[in-house]
Amino acid sequence: MMSPKNKNKPSDSPSKIDWSKKKIKFSFEYYDAGHKDYCLSNWSNDQILKTLKRLKDINLKNYHELIQGSRVYHFHEIHWEQTIHKSGFTNSAVNKLDPYQFALLSVNKQLARVFGAYYQDTFYIVWFDLNHEIWPVFPKGT
């Protein structure tokens, strides 16, 4: 809730905020726990612990930092036609937002990914992909 003394401040207007410089927040509003292949509960305790540590690390970054570190974080927009889910997420509400993914470093030999939607400074987590199955990477030349 905004304090009364700040409510008329022009920089508080959503159109004036540079969301790309605000730290990433995570939301589980659209988390798809019903999709058994992409549910975090199927992972080992060690993988879940490493995932939570990685989410904490990413939570300290902003959009620009994640894009600049794309070789490390593999943070980028999703092009559904290049995935095994051509029509996107099962929830139509989250499909109205820009789909993104990022890597969970140190989890499952760098294969693990988080898929969701990014809007303003919030990453809406939808799926946890342990084995990089949603957007498979094929060796070059095949």
Image (tube, rainbow, N blue to C red):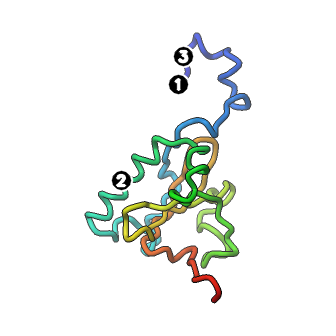
What label sits on residue 3 in the rendered view? Answer: 3
- Circle 2: element type: helix
Q: Nearer the viewer, residue 141 or 5?
A: 141
Give the quadrant of residue 81: bottom right
Give the farthest residue toward the bottom. Answer: 142
The nearer-to-camera label among 2 and 3 is 2
Mark 2 lies on residue: 52
Residue drawn where x is 44% and y is 61% of the image: 104
* Rendered location of residue 110, percent (x, y): 43, 67
Amino acid type for the residue under numbered disc 2: Leu
Circles 1 and 3, Cβ within 8 Å, touching? The answer is: yes
Residue to which mark 1 is pinned: 1
How many marks overall? 3
Q: Earlier in the sequence, mark 1 or mark 2?
A: 1
Residues at marks 2 and 3 touching, judged by CB atoms closer than 8 Å: no
Badge nearest the viewer, 1 or 2 = 2
Q: Amino acid at mark 3?
A: Ser
Q: Disc 2 or 3, which lies upstream in sequence?
A: 3
Q: Is residue 2 left or right of residue 129?
A: right
Q: CA distance from mark 1 to mark 2?
A: 27 Å
Q: Is residue 90 left or right of residue 106?
A: right
Please state the horizontal and vertical placement of residue 21, each as a whole percent of the image: 61, 36
